[in-house]
Amino acid sequence: MCGIAGTYRWPDGKVVTDRLTDTLAHRGPDGAGRYNHPVGDGEVHLGHRRLAIIDLSETGAQPMVKDGLVLTYNGELYNAPELRAELTAAGARFRGTSDTEVLLEAWRHWGTDCLPRLRGMFALGVFDERTGDLVLARDQLGIKPLFLLRRGEGLVFASELKALAAATGGSLEVDHAALVASLLYYWVPDSRCAFREAEKLPPGSWLRCRPDGRVERGTYWNLKDVAAEGRERARGGEQPDLAAIVEESTRQHLLSDVPVATFLSGGLDSSYLTALAARHQPGISAYTIGFRAEDAKFEAMPDDLRYARQVAERFGVDLHEIEIAPNVLDLLPRMTYSLDEPIGDPAAINTFLICSAAREAGVKVMLSGMGADELFAGYRKHLANLIALRYQRVPGPLRRGVAKAVDRLPVATARRGYRSVRFAKRFLSFAELPEETAFRRSYTMYDQDELLALIDPDLAGTVDDVLTEHADVYEDNELDDFVNRMCLGDARMFLPGLNLAYTDRSSMAASTEVRVPYVDVEVVKAAFAVPGDRKIVGRQGKAVLKEAATSILPKEIVYRPKGLFSAPLRAWMSRDLAPLVREVVNDGLLVESGFLRRDALARMVAEDASGQRDFSKHLWHVLTLEYWYRDATTGSGQSTH
């Protein structure tokens, strides 16, 4: 796991590549490498920062140069042993044991056709000294990031957006459409980028630059096709052996020459992975978090720690408990800088703190249960949207009576929050809407009118564009299964845009690699071969995964109430962060610039404080957006990190 960067026919390529690579030092503190070569009337420069995990010797160093091919690569290839055997049989010779060299030889033998054969997570740049071509590629599901920027015939790329911002000397303009999307979702979709000129290479795709200035793009893997194939397999009566597939993925994800540990929240996904990992690596370490007692009580948070201890004891896992009482005033700007784009999920703080604790204990690699909820319909929104279809059949007068009663209930008092009331209000905000609109409203922050009231009126057209884009992505499939349509929408938007993005950035900020065994091509294929009525059964989400997990986990863990990998936001907002919220509403750059409207923000703060509405998540995101915007427009935040 590493940081990669480079320039192709870019003015001052060497200086820029050095600056890019230095900005990524946290991604690879174990080593740095550079490479350059003439291309046409310019040069190519490749940079690399190394986090040594497989083949710790110099034979794994990068950029790797071998017989006219050069590779700078960030990621892990879990099927490297199988590919190595196949390539050796075909005549390839290997100098070391790294997966980097396997990838380089796979490229030599198959070119871009090697990409769909790779099982892992990766972002890479391959330069061919004979042709002068540079190819960039990104893994099938968007686990690893790759940002790029083109000017004229020149290109610059890096693992993080902040590197591009630093290398271009602060000349990048903020894209207000991306900020509008970020307000809606509390993250920036993978199709957009927070700076105008920059872009993210889409998952499952490659881009080739040629010395004559031509640029080609290709897609080698498409989730929409995988979902359609899964539907056909299900129709043919094929049922994947999910327990065997998840176990095999977990076993492959343990491939490492350094210690591997797990996240263990006590919920189903992390408990299942930890139990499987302990089967293959007895005595494995796991890390879990708890919150200050008063915060957890105020938030009415479930006691996840109890379940984590139970799993650890049963499977002989060495459990490390970290109590989180973070100084959020210090961590907020630091996390905003680390996350690259305005991402308003406080779970990023949890990931950073867990990874920091693991790193201090000498652990470089962690397994996470990320992705299971998206693929197997485990979020409350999935069940809620299914219930909404039934709710629409309830007589109108009765629905109106329920809505009035719920509207009058407070979401919090001075002493505690009421989660059930929050859920009820949330449900009624989308329960009577058409499918795509209801799904969007069930997990986004604002409806169209609320968003329009919050931002500069000149951006009204941008709101339409962002909402249309959601509809286009959601409806771009031929699935006749509502639950799998939601899962596909999540796997294409929510997973790469939010969960994989914050997991990569916050773990790498702590110089730690996080692996995600559920976000694996074989697990994903199996997930879409499972019909929706086996994913949600009655009121049980992730039913098919729970069934698989009972082969190793006790039922009280498998069927416990859903845990939360979140943070006590309401407690933080009402205590630690209240002065900061006031400052941002009154004197923040977003308000001063006209992007956000002070009156609408002040109304949100007042309604949240009175306990009538829960805007803690919205206000937290406004804080992250404000800090990001300050960094992006003035550079004021970057010197503090």
Image (spheres, rainbow, N blue to C red):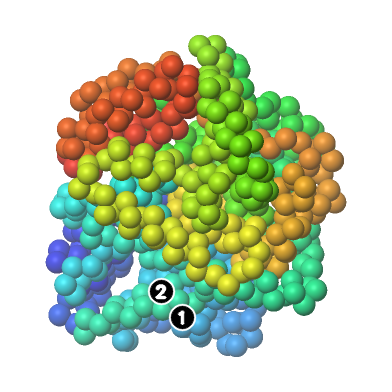
Residue named by callout 1:
112
First in sequence: mark 1 or mark 2? 1
How many numbered marks, from 0 up? 2
Structural crowding at the residue carrying mark 1, measured as other residues with C-alpha within 10 Å and reported as few (<14), some (14–19) or many (≥20): many
**SS label for mark 2:** strand
Q: For this rendering, which residue is in front, 549 or 375?
A: 375
Q: Residue at x 27, y 60 (%)?
A: 198
Q: Is residue 298 visible?
A: yes
Front position in the image: 171 or 283: 171
Instruction: Kindly identify the residue that appears in the image at 72 percent across and 52 percent down.
Output: 536
Which residue is at the far top? 415
**216 to 121, vertically: above or below:** below
Counting from the top left corner in percent of width and height, residue 148 is at: 30, 63
Query: Could you classify mark 2 by the number of other residues whose Cα lies within 10 Å: few (under 14), some (14-19), or many (20 or more)?
Result: many
- Give amino acid for label 1: Thr
> Callout 2, which amino acid?
Trp
- The image quadrant where one finds the C terminus is top left
Element under label 1?
Answer: helix
Q: Nearer the viewer, residue 403 or 356?
A: 403
Judged from this view, the residue extending furthest toward the front is 397
Residue at 22% across / 78% down in the picture? 38
Whether pointer 1 and pointer 2 mark residues with C-beta atoms closer than 8 Å, the reply is yes
Q: In the rendered image, is residue 639 in sight?
A: no
